Image (spheres, rainbow, N blue to C red):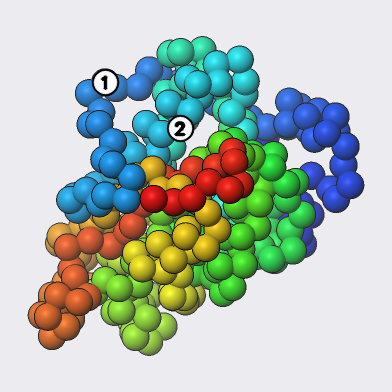
Amino acid sequence: MSSVSGPAGGIVGDGASPQAQAADWTSAGPRVRGVPSRTGASAPARAGQSTHPRAGLSDLFATSIRDYARQHPAEVVKVLQAGCTCPPGDLGLDRLHANWLEAAVRGIDADHSLTRSIARAGASDAASMPLVLGDLRTIPLPPRSFDVVYSAHLLDRIEHAELVLDRLVAALRPGGLLLLRFRDRECAAALLERRLPRVARRAIWHWLRPGQPGPGQGGPFPAVYEPLLSADGMHAYMLARGLVLTERQALRDRPRRPARFAWGAPLMCRLIATLSRGRLPDDHDDLLYVIRKPENRFARVL
């Protein structure tokens, strides 16, 4: 399916009937099949409990979406992916085929030079997801229509992050999963990224953001990091919206040894952590959250 970009075209137009929405999903959403999931995933932590930071990718999201799909075996899991620079395989959608489970994915992102280049690159790829670019505050999203809303490395680079997250939560059906991955604004790498001039950020972008498009494709994304993008900020948000935290993790998303142009960045991060006496740690970069939207709107977070 070719990627589509445009000025707030929306996933489903305002006023579309439920039948039109269902037809749109069954005809347009790419259904993902693939290899079986690997076994031996660790048991989830209790709600609200952090796990130890660790390097590399996490199976947290893949395990959560696979469990959700198993609970709804006769349905195509409808996924809204907010942000087109997500880590490859973060959701593990290619592992659902072993249990005859399927997922249909749609994507939205802010209209930026980098996202436009990604949309153009994906336009010729038949396997790429439909992608709509525009103002994330106004892109039409059908309410209560998605089983899973997944956002990775989006909220830390946009303004009005809380408003955008409210719209993503509204698009999630009761009982659905909100999967969030963002750079912790209270870590050393985030402070370094916010304080560095644009030229310096370009030089160390691929160390700070491994695997993400950057210099040569329109420059790095803005480093916004609103107060929501922290453990305290997200906790307050969930309490205010009545959302239930299922699990969270902290990950280090940077290589230990950078390229020659970024050789000073690890030293700066360690210096920031030392001078802040651990308030801005250097042991993790990203925070990962699995959040459930209660089926009962009067449910409370314990």
User: In the rendered view, would you say 111 is above or below 47?
Assistant: below
Picture disc at residue 274: none
- In the picture of the structure, the residue carrying the numbered disc 2 is 65
User: In the rendered view, would you say 210 is above or below 44?
Assistant: below
N-term mark: 2 or 1:
1
What's the residue at 89%, 47% (across, down)? Answer: 15
SS state under label 2: helix
Compute the Cα span from label 2 to label 1.
15 Å
- In the picture of the structure, the residue carrying the numbered disc 1 is 39
Residue 68, image x and y in percent? 48, 28
Quadrant position of the N terminus in the picture: top right
Residue 66, image x and y in percent? 43, 27
Q: Front-most of 223 and 182?
A: 182
Residue 93, image x and y in percent? 47, 30
What's the residue at 55%, 68% (across, down)? Answer: 161
What's the residue at 41%, 54% (across, down)? Answer: 181
What's the residue at 28%, 36% (across, down)? Answer: 44
Task: Tell me whether circle 2 and circle 1 mark residues in contact (CB < 8 Å).
Answer: no
The reply to whether residue 278 is in sight is yes
Type of residue at label 2? Ile
The reply to whether residue 115 is in sight is no
User: In the rendered view, would you say 212 is above or below 176?
Assistant: below
Q: How many marks?
A: 2
Type of residue at label 1? Thr
Residue 100, image x and y in percent? 51, 12
SS state under label 1: loop
